[in-house]
Image: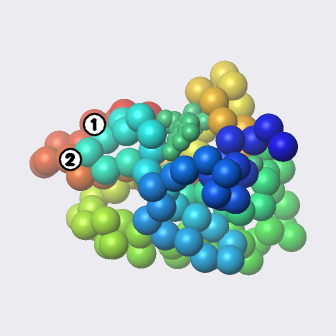
């Protein structure tokens, strides 16, 4: 198993987790691009959004409701961004679907991903 995020999910590589349940985990990005930068990662290995189908609708629905919950937990509910890079040309470096959650700026957030 080569996937670094699968290894983090399994505990084979350390991660600074802020949330875990049976379907997804959230951990701190190792190289933060914002004052608060975490990655929401479904446990199921999708390469990117291109592999998501309607069979995953329930999981993806749960992911959507998790963003504001995590933002609140991290104290960034006033303003946060969610971003997904899909494909190398879009800047994807880790090929296990993950949602960047970024926040914690002052009054004028910039686009940083
Ligand atoms: P991508 O460009 O694929 O959307 O984003 C990959 C993200 O994963 C980057 O923001 C990068 O800093 C982060 N990352 C890469 N390797 C590791 C790691 O081993 N641990 C953690 N916590 N984050 C990582
Ligand atoms: Zn994986």
Query: What element does badge 2 sit on?
Result: loop
* Residue 4 in picture, x, y percent from top left: 68, 41
**Residue that badge 1 annotates:** 110
Q: Are marks 1 and 2 in contact (CB under 8 Å)?
A: yes
Residue 52 relative to residue 86: left or right? right
For the question of whether residue 11 can be seen, the reply is yes
Dot 1 surroundings within 10 Å: few (below 14), some, or many (20 or more)?
few
Mark 1 vs 2, N-terminal side: 2
Eyeballing the image, is 92 above or below 48? above
* Residue 20 in picture, x, y percent from top left: 56, 71
* Residue 12 in picture, x, y percent from top left: 67, 51
CA distance separating discs 1 and 2: 8 Å
Q: Residue at x 33, y 72 (%)?
A: 73
Residue 21 relative to residue 95: left or right? left
Residue 85 relative to residue 109: left or right? right
Q: Residue at x 70, y 59 (%)?
A: 10
Eyeballing the image, is 52 above or below 30? below
Eyeballing the image, is 108 above or below 21? above
Looking at the image, what colour scheme do you see? rainbow
């Amino acid at each position: 198993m080569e996937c670094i995020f699968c290894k983090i999910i399994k505990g084979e590589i350390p991660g600074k987790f802020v949330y875990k349940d049976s379907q997804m985990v959230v951990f701190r990005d190792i190289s933060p691009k914002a004052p608060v930068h975490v990655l929401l990662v479904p446990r199921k290995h999708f390469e990117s959004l291109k592999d998501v189908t309607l069979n995953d609708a329930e999981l993806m629905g749960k992911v959507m409701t998790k963003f504001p919950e995590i933002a609140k937990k991290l104290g960034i509910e006033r303003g946060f961004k969610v971003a997904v890079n899909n494909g190398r040309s879009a800047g994807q470096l880790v090929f296990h679907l993950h949602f960047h959650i970024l926040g914690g700026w002052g009054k004028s957030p910039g686009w940083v991903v």
